[in-house]
Amino acid sequence: MKNKKRWLLIGVAILIAGLLIGSKVYMDKQQEAKVRKEKMIEIVKSEEAKKEFEVVLTNLDSKALTSDGKINTYSISNDTIRKNLMGGINVVLVINDDANLTIEYTLNMINGHLEAGGVSYSGSLANLLEQNHNE
């Protein structure tokens, strides 16, 4: 009987130790993810990223970010910033405060400089830009 209690106590102790170690590992991974997210936000909100966004915006609309352009403003939602599985950072820009007008970028660090990799934009934005060409 004493032998069974001893093994039961050892088993409970091992279980508690495992839970403590597992929760510590989980908390460490959560902290690492938070730090990575903060670093990505810092990169996406940097002046270098802003310049890269504006280059692409003016390629889409030569009068972008002026009163004459179809693209007047853009904003970045921190919720859209995520690591791209192929490298770089994915981010979505919301154009003119309209959630239907979006551009998704992949920002890549190439030779120490940020560059837009893949760029895709919503159908609604394509329609708005098409109106620009037809006028």
Image (cartoon, helix red, strand yellow):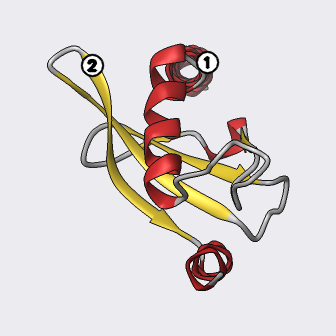
Query: Measuring 71% from the left and 66% from the top, which residue is drawn there?
Result: 101
Which label sits in the foreground, 2 or 1? Answer: 2
The amino acid marked with disc number 1 is Met
SS assignment at label 1: helix
Quadrant assignment for the C terminus: bottom right
> Which residue bears the numbered disc 2?
113
Q: Which dot marks residue 73?
A: none
SS assignment at label 2: strand
Query: Measuring 57% from the left and 14% from the top, which residue is drawn there?
Result: 24
Tell me where residue 41 appears, x and y as whole percent.
Answer: 59, 23
Tell me where residue 91 appears, x and y as whole percent.
Answer: 54, 45
Question: Dot 2, how many residues are within 10 Å of its Cα: few (below 14), some (14-19), or many (20+)?
Answer: few
**3 or 29: nearer the viewer:** 29
Left or right position of 16 against 7 = right
> Which residue bears the numbered disc 1?
27
Where is 125 relative to 91, above or below? below
